[in-house]
Image (cartoon, rainbow, N blue to C red):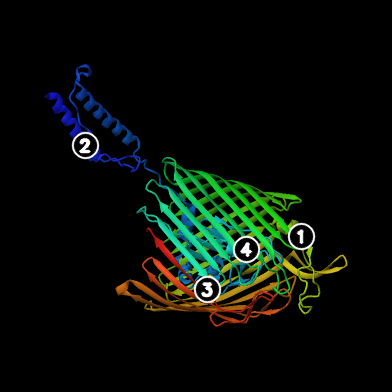
């Protein structure tokens, strides 16, 4: 009888324990004294050789419970040290909410990162065609590569060689899947974020999940004229064990406005921070980009297209250590870069870039200040299928941040030693002061940058791509481009003063940016003789450039029902080498208005939007008059909690626009899409 009673007791206890046990591989168990006490069952002391079969089974069960307690203790969550991030301190210190342009873009529309600048008249945005072909941004009307692009803490420098080179970045190549905050910073502020330019910077910041450990997921879908489709997705999450994860995907496809103007691309990005123990972290990030499509040079009726394709791969991996007092972080990392730009057709090109970099960073928290010290060594290689060129760079810098209740201060200084151009110093200082109704920012920056290997080593290529062009535009049908091995380093000295008076919704802003570019590097177009042949040649040259940009902008809001923004900018640019450059209007005007109504019973936001974009007169490469067109874009949308649907009419009044030389943009373009934050 005792045997059966013990067996029944064992089965009951086993059933109860099976219902209460939680698999530790699925759930992280934090030590709880009530659970520990309930598990500490003290069995009677029984001699092993006197146990019955039922007693042995019961003892085996208790032993398993004891082993489980030991395993649980080994799997307890390790208390992590506070993760220091100098970049996060940068964003909270220098990226004031008044500088965030996201709300203006959200009211309007954006098909790429170039559209972020459309609402800022100090930046000349040029669409070669409305569906993706090429979109460039000229800060303060300046040409050349003078814009920093910082995406989620990483500096992006996409490269592509095209006929009629200008050194500008194609902003179709910038990932936008994670963008939640958009900052357009005039002057040298971007140097503190890791950029090498002193003129202007675009900084985009993803949404940061809160401590609830819930994921933030966004899906953005665009569909429009000429089989245009653009899908963007982003995922960010902070895990309970301290791990961080950011992922994004961008996919774009378009048939184009005319024959042979198709375009296809994809862009994947990822970033993670993984705690290895209480003090050590593994940091990794990377992106892969691929794009292929057609590209036309001049008027489609007289110029055949070329096929262009490019890829961009970059990756970073590092080990990071937090000090015992949680005030210092050490970062030892490796960065990799691979870029390819290929052109096929009458004009051909193969351009490959490779980069490897070792980096050591020390970040320290000092009371209300943070100090970052960085040393890196990089080796860059260029190949054009015939020759290989390379350069080495050693960089050292220090950056200081300080913030109090009504102001912030940032300072960076350092130098790059280039094996061809020797020492290239740089420095930037930024001061901000703010209150409820005032915001002021002052910056002064200097940087010296070497020309790229592409600028100096591009081999001469001649092609008859201008055949059939009217003689009123050019005296020669022959095109040529070539690098310049005699280029000097460019020296940038730029200052900015920005003042805004009023609240966040009702204010007046004044911005003045200007400076001197000593030995500025730009691609110049000239008619010249090569042998006995007259050609239209594109070649980079040095020239001193003086520039100044004055902007006035006002925002007005009435009870969140009416929102109005209007602004204008005047660009002054003086070149030592030439009188003027192509695609540089003297002034620009932007105006936008929104009507908003909240339908409380249905939780729906209804919006009507319209904007006017105007640029003054400017000329193309062949002195063709351009500009002086009023372009009106309009749209309507509704928002239901986290779902936002919109319909856009671009060029609503059907304005004829030559943009650029001989590309006649005539017609209304329609786009629709939605943004959906789900699983939040």
Pointer 2 with pointer 3, Cβ within 8 A: no
- Residue 516 % position (x, y): 66, 67
Of circles 4 and 1, which is in front? 4
Residue 484 is tagged as 1
Q: Secondary structure at mark 4?
A: loop
In the picture as drawn, the residue positioned furthest to the right comes out as 532
- Which residue does the numbered mark 2 point to in the structure image? 15
Check disc 3: other Cα within 10 Å, few if <14, some if 14-19, many if 20+: many
Of circles 1 and 2, which is in front? 2
**Residue in the image at 39% along x and 60% along y:** 678
- Residue 385 % position (x, y): 74, 51
How far is the residue under mark 2 from the one under mark 4? 67 Å
Pointer 4 with pointer 1, Cβ within 8 A: no
Q: Secondary structure at mark 2?
A: helix
How far is the residue under mark 1 from the one under mark 3? 36 Å
Q: Secondary structure at mark 1?
A: loop
Check disc 1: other Cα within 10 Å, few if <14, some if 14-19, many if 20+: some
Q: Earlier in the sequence, mark 1 or mark 2?
A: 2
Q: Earlier in the sequence, mark 4 or mark 3?
A: 3
- Which residue does the numbered mark 3 point to in the structure image? 119
User: Where 68 sits versus 392, above or below?
Assistant: above
User: Where 45 sits versus 191, above or below?
Assistant: above
- Which residue does the numbered mark 4 point to in the structure image? 169
How far is the residue under mark 2 from the one under mark 3? 67 Å
Q: Secondary structure at mark 3?
A: loop
Quarter holding the N terminus? Answer: top left
- Residue 572 % position (x, y): 64, 75
User: Where 228 sits versus 488, above or below?
Assistant: below
Q: Earlier in the sequence, mark 2 or mark 3?
A: 2
State the image quarter where residue 536 is shown. Answer: bottom right
- Residue 421 % position (x, y): 71, 53
């Amino acid at each position: 009888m005792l045997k059966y009673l013990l067996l029944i007791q064992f089965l009951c206890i086993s059933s109860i324990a099976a219902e209460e046990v939680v698999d530790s591989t699925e759930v992280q168990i934090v030590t709880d004294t009530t659970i520990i006490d309930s598990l500490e069952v003290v069995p009677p002391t029984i001699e092993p050789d006197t146990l019955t079969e039922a007693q042995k089974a019961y003892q085996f069960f208790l032993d398993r419970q004891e082993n489980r307690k030991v395993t649980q203790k080994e799997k307890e969550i390790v208390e992590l040290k506070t993760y220091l991030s100098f970049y996060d301190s940068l964003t909270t210190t220098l990226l004031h909410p008044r500088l965030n342009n996201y709300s203006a873009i959200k009211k309007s529309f954006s098909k790429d990162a170039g559209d972020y600048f459309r609402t800022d008249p100090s930046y000349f945005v040029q669409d070669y065609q409305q569906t993706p072909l090429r979109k460039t941004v000229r800060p303060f009307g300046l040409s050349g590569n003078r814009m920093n692009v910082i995406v989620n803490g990483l500096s992006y420098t996409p490269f592509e060689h095209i006929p009629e080179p200008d050194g500008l970045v194609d902003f179709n190549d910038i990932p936008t899947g994670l963008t939640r905050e958009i900052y357009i910073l005039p002057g040298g502020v971007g140097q503190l974020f890791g950029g090498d330019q002193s003129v202007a910077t675009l900084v985009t910041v993803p949404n940061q999940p809160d401590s609830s450990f819930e994921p933030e997921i966004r899906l953005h879908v665009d569909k429009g004229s000429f089989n245009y489709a653009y899908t963007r997705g982003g995922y960010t999450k902070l895990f309970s064990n301290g791990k961080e994860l950011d992922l994004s995907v961008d996919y774009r496809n378009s048939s184009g406005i005319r024959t042979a103007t198709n375009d296809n691309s994809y862009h994947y990005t990822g970033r993670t921070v993984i705690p290895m123990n209480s003090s050590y972290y593994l940091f990794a990030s990377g992106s892969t980009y691929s794009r292929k499509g057609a590209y036309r040079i001049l008027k489609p009726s007289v110029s055949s297209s070329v096929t262009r394709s490019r890829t961009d791969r970059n990756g970073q991996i590092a080990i990071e250590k937090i000090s015992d007092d949680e005030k210092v972080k050490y970062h030892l990392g490796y960065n990799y870069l691979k870029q390819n730009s290929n052109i096929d057709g009458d004009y051909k090109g193969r351009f490959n870039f490779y980069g490897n970099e070792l980096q050591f960073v020390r970040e320290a928290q000092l009371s209300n200040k943070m100090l970052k010290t960085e040393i890196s060594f990089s080796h860059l290689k260029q190949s054009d299928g015939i020759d290989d060129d390379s350069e080495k760079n050693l960089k050292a810098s220090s950056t200081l941040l300080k913030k109090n209740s009504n102001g912030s201060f940032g300072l960076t200084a350092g130098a790059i030693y280039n094996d061809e151009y020797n020492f290239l110093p740089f420095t930037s200082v930024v001061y901000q002061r703010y209150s409820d109704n005032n915001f002021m920012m002052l910056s002064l920056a200097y940087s010296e940058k070497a020309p790229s290997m592409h600028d100096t080593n591009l081999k001469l290529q001649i092609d008859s791509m201008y055949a059939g062009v009217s003689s009123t535009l050019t005296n020669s049908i022959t095109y040529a481009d070539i690098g310049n091995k005699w280029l000097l380093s460019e020296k940038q000295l730029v200052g900015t003063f920005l003042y805004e008076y009023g609240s966040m919704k009702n204010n007046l802003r004044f911005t003045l940016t200007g400076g001197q570019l000593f030995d500025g590097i730009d691609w110049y177009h000239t008619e010249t003789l090569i042998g006995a042949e007259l050609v239209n040649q594109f070649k980079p040259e040095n020239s001193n450039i003086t520039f100044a940009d004055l902007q006035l902008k006002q925002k007005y809001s009435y009870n969140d029902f009416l929102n109005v923004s209007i602004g204008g900018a005047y660009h002054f640019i003086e070149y030592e080498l030439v009188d003027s450059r192509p695609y540089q209007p003297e002034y620009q005007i932007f105006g936008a208005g929104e009507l908003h109504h909240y339908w409380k019973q249905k939780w729906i936001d209804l919006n009507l939007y319209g904007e006017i974009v105007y640029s003054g007169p400017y000329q193309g490469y062949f002195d063709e008059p351009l500009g002086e067109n009023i372009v009106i874009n309009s749209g309507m949308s509704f928002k239901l909690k986290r779902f936002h649907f919109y319909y856009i009419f671009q060029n609503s009044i059907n304005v004829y626009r030559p943009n650029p030389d001989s590309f006649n943009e005539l017609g209304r373009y329609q786009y629709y899409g939605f943004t959906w934050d789900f699983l939040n």
